[in-house]
Amino acid sequence: MESSEFRVKTIAFYNPRSGVGSTTLAAFACILAANDAIGVTGASLDPKRSLMRWLVNYQGIAWTDASGPSLAPQEECDDLLVLDVSSTSQCTDILQPDLWVMPMCDRASYEAAVLAAPALMGPILWVW
């Protein structure tokens, strides 16, 4: 039997402008994945740890403070790591998720996204 290397998929929700729904979308991504029996860990790169408040009531969804020593999922069975990246985060230039999700709700959040996009490594999904 051939051994295949398993790698956790990572999705990062981010917009340099606050209040556009990044945390809400990250939480719903975690909940939808868990409802589909996908092992998921939510991680906050947010000093307020807003994602934790969303996930605390859902069993089966691990949460980690990504400002800690590791961004690795808590358990080996996790298939998906969902990052809630704060608008004030200074580490976007080192993150390499499989997908950036860039939510926008108005012209100002769009313009902020346009300015931030060149510094992000990897594909970006623009969500209005």
Image (cartoon, rainbow, N blue to C red):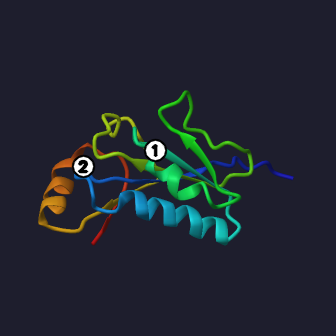
From the top left corner, tell me how far across and down residue 106 is, in percent.
Answer: 17, 68
Q: Is residue 84 above or below residue 34?
A: above
User: Would residue 90 appear left or right of 12 to someone viewing this image?
Assistant: left
Answer few, some or many: residues within 10 Å of disc 1's Cα (few below 14, many 20 plus, some between 14 and 19): some
Dividing the picture into quadrants, the one containing residue 111 is bottom left
From the top left corner, tell me how far across and down residue 62 is, in percent.
Answer: 64, 50
Say whether marks 2 and 1 touch (CB < 8 Å).
Answer: no
Q: Secondary structure at mark 2?
A: loop
Q: Is residue 83 above or below residue 45?
A: below
Farthest residue in the right direction?
1
- Kindly identify the residue that appears in the image at 50 percent across and 66 percent down: 28
User: Would residue 11 appear left or right of 86 to someone viewing this image?
Assistant: right
User: Would residue 41 appear left or right of 67 to someone viewing this image?
Assistant: right
- Kindly identify the residue that appears in the image at 16 percent across and 50 percent down: 115
Front residue of this view, candidates 88 and 47:
47
From the top left corner, tell me how far across and down residue 76 is, in percent.
Answer: 74, 45
- Kindly identify the residue that appears in the image at 46 percent across and 44 percent down: 49
Answer few, some or many: residues within 10 Å of disc 2's Cα (few below 14, many 20 plus, some between 14 and 19): many
Farthest residue in the top direction?
69
Q: Which residue is mark 2?
A: 16
User: Would residue 102 appear left or right of 52 to someone viewing this image?
Assistant: left
Q: For the residues carrying marks 2 and 1, which lies nearer the camera in this image?
A: 1
Q: Which residue is mark 1?
A: 49
Q: Is residue 87 above or below residue 91?
A: below
Q: Secondary structure at mark 1?
A: loop
Marks 2 and 1 sit apart, C-alpha to C-alpha, by: 17 Å
The amino acid type found where label 2 is placed reads Pro
Q: Quadrant of the C terminus?
A: bottom left
From the top left corner, tell me how far across and down residue 8 is, in percent.
Answer: 61, 50
Front residue of this view, candidates 72 and 35:
35
The amino acid type found where label 1 is placed reads Arg
